């Protein structure tokens, strides 16, 4: 058997162990390149077969080639007095490089197999991962906002795995309208004449403006020119829609006369934007939806409302801060109302537009509608969600988002006390852990000045000193756990608000803390 066909550390038939390391005494500039195993020899290792079965021949070979190419590159770099890093022209350049640093080349068959397996697992690990949201923000935009109820998730699973009548009319046998799957529910729940669905509320605003006001003017109060996450601004979306923004009033005060005085022959609509992610307090004046609708209709114009978060129920019935509902906005005279699906509504990412039948028809004829429409998975989730709203009395037990909003502080405290001993054992003596009250927020721009009494675990440095860098390092270590823990660092502590920790996940959460023992 040729020497290069025997993996490093593999015992050949003659009993001579082949080494992939350079011979002793051969330093940089004078050594001979070590003999490396061939790709074929590595593939024949007994431990490689399970990897080939799971990851396939193509990717396994690619990883092996990268390892060998990097080893050659590292040796050449050392021989030339370099740092042993891969060059741009090497075979491994441009790909995720499996580093041989920090342990050198594998020295046994088992080590080669383990190295290849570790790289394959890392390369094919999912990028979208489950996390524990302990930030204190229930509808966290960066963590996916609303959690879908089980009934909704099951409907999504069915839609994903079977054909469905997305645009097929089962009665006539002809082509159908996908909006019809949910528009009936929305008409009943909102009191509007018709409805259409797009992929988020920003898309809904864009579609309304482009369909009804392209090349014309839209009147909006200066105090409602909001910016939401990701630098989405009403003036920018209006410009992209081809509409001309006409600002009226001031930041803190706008009067009915401001709207009426701004109407010209080029005015296409009056618009209200719900300031869901901030509040102006003090010497303020705003014009109600009823008043703006009256002014618009007197001038023969439509009035549209960007409601932002949007809710179909009065949240105050469960002790939450009151938020204007979609039904109330429609009843106030709004001709079109747009709102989100994955915020207060508790469903998937989507944008709902409800309103007058003729205006909805104009929106659906716009070519943009096809570009912004949703697919069967989203519609399956929406339909299942809206069915839950048909029985509002059972929403607290069936709607995950609402259940998290109204979770009692005492219940959260009991959970924190159950978890405390395990965390203390894992983090002592470097860190102290205490159960403390705190405040959650709804998030995603909804009810920005209101908070929810909560409770959680607070981690501080045991020596009582300021430990900014160490706290950030601890927070980073929490994010490296099998199921990352996302908290917040503030006031010289790591705060873990347990409002969103489901009791069913307590076991998984607690077991992970054993991996943090002796964390500096």
Image (spheres, grey):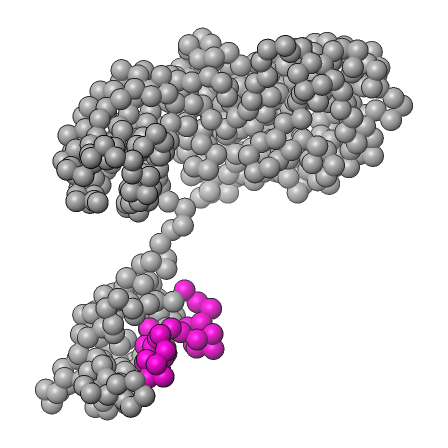
Task: Please tell me which residue lies in front, 176 or 26.
Answer: 26
Q: Which residue is drawn at 55% across and 34% down?
A: 229
Magenta region: which residues?
67-96
Q: Which residue is drawn at 53% across and 19% down?
A: 311
Task: Please tell me which residue lies in front, 24 or 421.
Answer: 24
Residue 57 on image: x %, y %: 35, 70
- Residue at the front extreme? 465
Residue 366 on image: x %, y %: 74, 37
Q: Residue at x 56, y 38 (%)?
A: 230
Q: Compared to 41, does 262 lie above or below?
A: above
Q: Compared to 230, does 185 lie above or below?
A: above
- Tell me if 269 is positioned left or right of 94 in this view: right
- Tell me if 471 is positioned left or right of 225 in this view: left
Is residue 83 shown in magenta?
yes
Q: Quadrant of the C terminus?
A: top left
Residue 357, by quadrant, is top right
Task: Please tell me which residue lies in front, 231 or 43.
Answer: 231
- Residue at the left extreme? 15
Number of numbered tags placed on the structure image: 0
**In this orientation, does residue 171 appear?**
no
Residue 496, by quadrant, is top left
Q: In which quarter of the image is the N terminus?
A: bottom left
Is residue 308 shown in magenta?
no
Residue 501, by quadrant, is top left
Residue 92 on image: x %, y %: 41, 73
Q: Residue at x 33, y 73 (%)?
A: 67
Residue 482 on image: x %, y %: 28, 46
Task: Please tell me which residue lies in front, 180 or 190.
Answer: 190
- Tell me if 353 is positioned left or right of 38 in this view: right
């Amino acid at each position: 058997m040729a020497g290069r066909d025997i993996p490093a550390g593999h015992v050949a038939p003659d009993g001579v162990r082949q080494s992939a390391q350079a011979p002793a005494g051969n330093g940089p500039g004078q050594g001979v390149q070590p003999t490396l195993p061939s790709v074929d020899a590595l593939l024949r290792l007994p431990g490689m077969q399970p990897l080939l079965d799971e990851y396939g021949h193509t990717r396994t070979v690619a990883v092996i080639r990268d390892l060998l190419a990097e080893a050659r590159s590292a040796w050449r770099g050392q021989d030339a007095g370099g740092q042993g890093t891969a060059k741009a022209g090497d075979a491994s350049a441009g790909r995720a490089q499996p580093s041989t640093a920090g342990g050198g080349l594998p020295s046994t068959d088992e080590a080669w197999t383990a190295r290849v397996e570790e790289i394959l697992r890392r390369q094919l690990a999912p990028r979208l991962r489950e996390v524990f949201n302990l930030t204190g923000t229930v509808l966290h935009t960066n963590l996916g906002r609303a959690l879908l109820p089980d009934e909704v998730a099951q409907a999504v699973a069915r839609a994903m795995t079977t054909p469905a009548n997305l645009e097929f009319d089962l009665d006539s046998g002809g082509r159908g309208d996908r909006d019809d799957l949910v528009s009936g529910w929305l008409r009943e729940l909102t009191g509007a004449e018709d409805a259409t669905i797009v992929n988020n509320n920003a898309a809904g605003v864009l579609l309304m403006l482009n369909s009804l006001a392209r090349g014309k003017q839209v009147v909006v109060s200066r105090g409602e020119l909001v910016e939401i996450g990701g630098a989405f601004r009403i003036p920018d979306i209006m410009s992209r829609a081809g509409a001309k923004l006409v600002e009226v009033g001031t930041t803190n005060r706008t009067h009915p006369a401001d709207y009426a005085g701004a109407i010209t022959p080029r005015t296409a609509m009056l618009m209200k934007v719900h300031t869901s992610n901030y509040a102006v307090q003090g010497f303020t004046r705003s014009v109600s939806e009823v008043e703006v609708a009256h002014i618009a209709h007197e001038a023969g114009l439509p009035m549209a409302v960007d409601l932002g978060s949007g809710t179909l129920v009065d949240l105050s019935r469960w002790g939450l801060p009151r938020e204007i509902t979609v039904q109330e906005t429609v009843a106030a005279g709004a001709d079109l109302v747009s709102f989100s699906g994955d915020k207060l509504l508790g469903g998937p990412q989507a944008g709902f537009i409800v309103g007058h039948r003729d205006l909805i028809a104009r929106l659906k004829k716009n070519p943009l509608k096809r570009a912004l429409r949703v697919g069967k998975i989203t519609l399956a989730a929406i339909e299942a969600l809206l069915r839950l709203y048909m029985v509002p009395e059972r929403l607290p037990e069936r709607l995950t988002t609402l259940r998290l909003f109204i979770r009692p502080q005492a219940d959260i405290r009991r959970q924190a006390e159950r978890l405390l001993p395990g965390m203390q054992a894992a983090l002592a003596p470097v860190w102290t852990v205490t159960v403390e009250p705190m405040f959650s927020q709804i998030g995603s721009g909804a009810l920005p000045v209101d908070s929810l009494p909560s409770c959680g675990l607070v981690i501080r440095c045991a020596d009582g000193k300021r430990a900014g860098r160490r706290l950030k390092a601890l927070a980073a270590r929490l994010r490296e756990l099998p199921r990352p823990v996302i908290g917040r660092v503030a006031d010289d502590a790591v705060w873990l608000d347990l409002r969103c920790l489901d009791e069913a996940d307590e076991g998984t959460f607690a077991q992970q803390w054993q991996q943090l023992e002796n964390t500096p």
